[in-house]
Image (cartoon, rainbow, N blue to C red):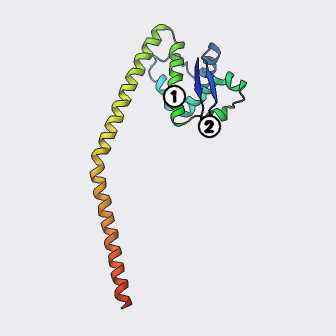
Amino acid sequence: MQLIKLRSGTTVEMVMTAQSVLDVNNYMKFNILDVDKEGNLERLLDSQLDLVNVMYLLCEEDCKKQNVSDIDFGRGMGGEHIRLATEQFLDELKDFLPLQKRVMMTHTLKVMAEVQADVMESAIARMEGMKEGIRNIMNKEMDKKLTLQNLENTFAEQKQS
């Protein structure tokens, strides 16, 4: 069981049960417990809309008790809330799996986190490398505008005299 905090401050329980897994499988059109099959985990994590709907299905029982609709739940997800809820969902899923799949998923998540960190680091390095070029372009554009403005001012002064 995981506690999911929504933007509103409401906290709901995420519980993975056999019934909630069936509900999620019907929604996703594949067995979410088959995380070892290529593409299943990525497919689940690639669409934030699907992910929020899946998390709602796992929180639905408590949401109903607290009068949190699926729309309210969706509105309560975003930014840091969805990131944390996703981590909690993955922990809940991992804990629900049999041992062999749990070990495989633990390793998969570790590799995914390492790759994401590498990609982020590479993207930041590329942006840093482009910074000087962007500055040069902006300075040239600013020089053009200032020169044009100077010409317009000079022309206006000559016209007045």
Residue 81 vs residue 48, the one in the foreground: 81
Tell which circle, 1 or 2, labels the residue nearer the N-terminal end: 2
Q: Position of residue 18 (x, y in %)?
A: 62, 13
Say few, some or many: other residues with alpha carbon within 10 Å of mark 1 (under 14 / 14 to 19 / 20 or more).
Answer: some
Screen quadrant of the N terminus: top right
Screen quadrant of the C terminus: bottom left
Q: Residue at x 60, y 32 (%)?
A: 6
Three-letter residue code for mark 2: Arg
Residue 150 vs residue 43, the one in the foreground: 150
Give the answer, above or below, for where 80 lies relative to 99: below
Q: Residue at x 43, y 14 (%)?
A: 104
Q: Residue at x 53, y 16 (%)?
A: 33
Q: Position of residue 95 (x, y in %)?
A: 52, 13
Three-letter residue code for mark 1: Leu
Q: Residue furthest bottom?
A: 161
Q: CA distance from mark 1 to mark 2?
A: 15 Å
Image side of residue 158 versus residue 22, left or right:
left
Q: Residue at x 54, y 23 (%)?
A: 89
Image side of residue 25 versus residue 99, left or right:
right
Q: Position of residue 126 (x, y in %)?
A: 30, 42
Say few, some or many: other residues with alpha carbon within 10 Å of mark 2 (under 14 / 14 to 19 / 20 or more).
Answer: few
Q: Element at badge 1?
A: helix
Q: Position of residue 64 (x, y in %)?
A: 71, 25
Residue on which the image places disc 2: 75
Choose top left, top right, bottom left or bottom right for residue 107: top left
Residue on which the image places disc 1: 84
Q: Element at badge 2?
A: helix
| Res. 143 in view | yes
Image side of residue 36 versus residue 154, left or right:
right
